[in-house]
Amino acid sequence: MSASRIPQLPAEVPQVRSRWRRWVGLIGLALGGWRVEGNLPNLRKFVLIVAPHTSNWDFPVAMLLKSAMGIEVKFWAKDSLFTIPVFGRWLRWLGGVPLMRKAASGVVAQMVALIQRKKAESSYFWLALSPEGTRSYQPGWRSGFYRVALEAGVPLALASLDYSKKTLVLRHYVQLSG
C-alpha cells in the first residue's frame, strides 16, 4: 500500500455513509499533509491504542483520519468535556464515551460488557484509546486498554501519530494472552 493514500477498508467493515464527513476528513488531511501507513484490520472488534498522546492536535488529526477512512470508532474522553451541552453532544456523535478518571466507576467492566454484547450480535466495535490517559508526561501507561482487550478477548492494535512525517502508522495487531 502506498503511504500517500487512505487505505481501503475490507468490504465487511461497516463504513460511515456520510459523504460530506469523508470529504471533510480527506480535505483536512490533504491540507495538513497527513497520510496513513499500514492497513486497517479485517477484525470485527479490537482495541486500538494510539501513542504517544502528547499534543492538543492529536484529537483533530485523529478525527480527520477517522472521517477520511469512513470508520466508526469509539473513544474515551474525560467526563468534564461532556458537561458543555453542545460540545458534549458533538463528542458523543463523534464516538466519545465519557470517562470518570477520578473515581473507580467500572468503565473497564462496562466496556467489556458492551464488546461482549456486540460479539453476540456479530457486529463491529472498534475502540481507540490513549494508553497514557492524558497529554501530560506519564512514566508509564494506564492499564485500562489492556484490561478491556484481555477481558473482552479481542485483539490489541498499535498505532502512532508521527508528527515529523505527518503519518498515522498502523502496523501491529496482537492477541493478548495475559
Image: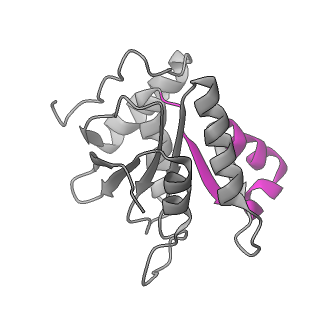
Identify the residue at the far front of this view: 177
Q: Residue at x 53, y 20 (%)?
A: 20
**Is 163 situated above or below 37?**
below
Decide whether the magenta segment is chiefly helix, strand or loop. helix
Residue at 34% x, 52% y is 159
Residue 161 position by quadrant: bottom left
Q: Nearer the viewer, residue 27 or 16?
A: 16
Whether 75 is among the magenta residues is yes
The residue sitting at the bottom extreme is 139
Residue 76 horizontal side relative to residue 137, left or right: right
Location of residue 168 in the rendering, given as x and y in whole percent from the top left corner: 31, 47
Q: Is residue 77 magenta?
A: yes
Q: Residue at x 54, y 71 (%)?
A: 134
Q: Residue at x 77, y 65 (%)?
A: 105
Give the vertical position of 21 relative to 75 (above or below).
Answer: above
Q: Quadrant of the C terminus?
A: bottom left
Left or right of residue 106: residue 112: left
Please tell me whether residue 105 is drawn above or below residue 93 in the rendered image: below
Q: Which residues are magenta?
A: 71-93
Q: Nearer the viewer, residue 24 or 106?
A: 106
Q: Position of residue 93 (x, y in %)?
A: 69, 36
Percent coordinates x, y for residue 69 in the rendering: 41, 29
Q: Is residue 56 left or right of residue 5?
A: right
Say whether residue 142 is left or right of residue 177.
right
Quarter of the N terminus within the rendering: top left
Q: Position of residue 107 (x, y in %)?
A: 70, 59
